[in-house]
Image (tube, grey):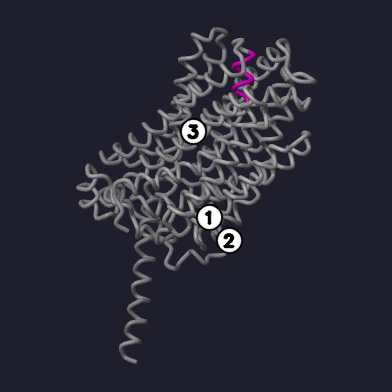
Amino acid sequence: MSVVGWRRIEVIMLLAAVLGLDGADKCTIGAIATSLESALHIGNTEIGLLVTASTGVGALATLPLGILVDRINRKRLLTGAIVVWSIAMVVSAFAHSFSWLLLSRLGLGAIVATAFPAVASLAGDMFPSFERGRIWGYLLAGELLGTAFGFLVSGLLAGAVDWRAPFWALGLIGFTLAGLVAWRLPEPMRGGHALLPPYRHDRQQAHADDDREALAKEIEAFDIPARKDRVLTENPANMPLRKALAYVLTIRTNVALIVASALGYFYFTGIRTFAVVFMSGRFGLSESVASLTTVGLGLGSILGVLVTGQLADRLIARDKITARIVVGGLAFLVTAAVLLPALMSQMLWVAAPMLFLSAVALGGSNPPLDAARLDIIPSRLWGRAESIRTTLRYAFEAVAPLAFGYFSSLFGGGGGAYGPTSDTIEQGAQGLDDAFLLLLILPALAGVILLLAHSSYPRDTATALASERALADSENEARNRRESRTTSG
């Protein structure tokens, strides 16, 4: 596939928009939480349950959809998921009770279950490894822009019209994106055989690496051996799910990445869901101003994902093989270290810079880790491997809003029995403050896990590269035998 310039940008934008749609959905409930609490007579626990509903369905559906990602046309699968998501969003706009809204949220699990496995597989097949950290930075920036869009637009629409307006707007956007994905997104050959050419300033490096990545060159230069008993010699596309699960979950680095990512997303989901409620009550901001402030923190996360992916790529090019693991781990530790004093501060002008820096670090933890997952998994297992990781991530995300809501109520905040008042909002914020502090141990633990796991990453990467070569040799031998039989016949 010889696509350059705008076509390459278009592909990145479409994949980023798919993740952005997921991000917009998940933060919409948080952005209009106070309006929902007042209209439907609910509290923080019910708000958490609304987010848990769609995420929980996505967690259950991710594994079977991951199998489909490795076997069928990924573009069509994504298109169908976005259409189902958009229909469910429109149904949510018609809700007249908490039960109706809760049931309508279940259909939103379609995009949850499909987005990350399909996007990871497509990105792996279209972009070379030496720039995957940067590419994942762009894609996750799309997710965060969607989150910022959801906070900003949903909050403003809910304030100017009512809480139903954001669902109508997002449903329309979803139908539009489904059409664009069906029309403009390519379906590449599997196994990295349809790489999109890099920009001009990277072409010399790409040619020097013969499209086998700078990382592969470093692995060979340091003479890092593969785990011979783990090298695949038969096409894993048809591998039974149980066998694929066993293979993926016995890759030590992958297990560390899965656990650390799940812990990080658990904390991020809690903050995303209750950020507006917290900012409103803690610092006396209106819902619209709190939404704008939260968008500002989202911009910090976007800055983080754009910086760390490129940083890790450049460090790898300078012989720092484990850069992706180490950068991700340090980002988690910085998040915990900076958030601690920020959450203890009572003054916005003191807390705001630290909250912004923590957003940069928390967002920046993801691109190098997402790129590292593609490094250590053979390409024809990318869909299922990502679905396994996504299942655990979404299981944690499904529990997170409920857990944060429960702990906030336990510590004195419930959001009010019949919607927020000035007193109950402040009480709810205090409860959320305590919940954020208690659960701050999770990103710190994620950072420690990654730093401990960096030693297994080079050999796991060498094993994945050896599997790719063995599979290519096996396919070439099979092709030569077929051609030989045809010629002799």
Q: Main secondary structure of the magenta part?
A: helix
The location of residue 296, given as percent across then percent down, is 48, 21
Give the magenta part as a residue range.
Answer: 274-281
| Quarter of the figure that contains the C terminus | bottom left
Task: Identify the residue at horizontal 66%, vertical 44% (top origin).
Answer: 88
- Nearest the viewer among 167 and 118 is 167
Q: Disc 2 on helix, strand or loop?
A: helix
279 magenta-colored: yes
Residue 146 position within the rendered picture, expressed as x and y whole percent measured from the top left = 51, 35
Going from N to C along the chain, the mark reached first, 1 or 2, is 2
Which residue is at a point 53% across and 55% down the rendered structure image? 384
Against 175, residue 280 (above or below) is above
Residue 158 in the figure: left or right of residue 14: right
Amino acid at pointer 1: Arg
Badge 3 is on which residue?
144
Question: Amino acid under label 3?
Answer: Leu
In whole angstroms, how far apart are the C-alphas of marks 1 and 3?
24 Å
Figure quadrant of residue 334: top left
> Which disc is residue 241 wearing?
2
Q: Which mark is residue 384?
A: 1
Q: Tell me what residue is drawn at x 42 percent, y 43 percent.
A: 13
Mark earlier in primary sequence (3, 2): 3
Mark 1: give few (<14), some (14-19) or many (20+) Cα within 10 Å: many
**Residue 40 versus residue 217 in the image, above or below:** above
> Residue 396: x, y in percent?
62, 38
Given contact means CB atoms under 8 Å apart, are the residues at marks 1 and 2 in contact?
yes
Q: Secondary structure at mark 3?
A: helix
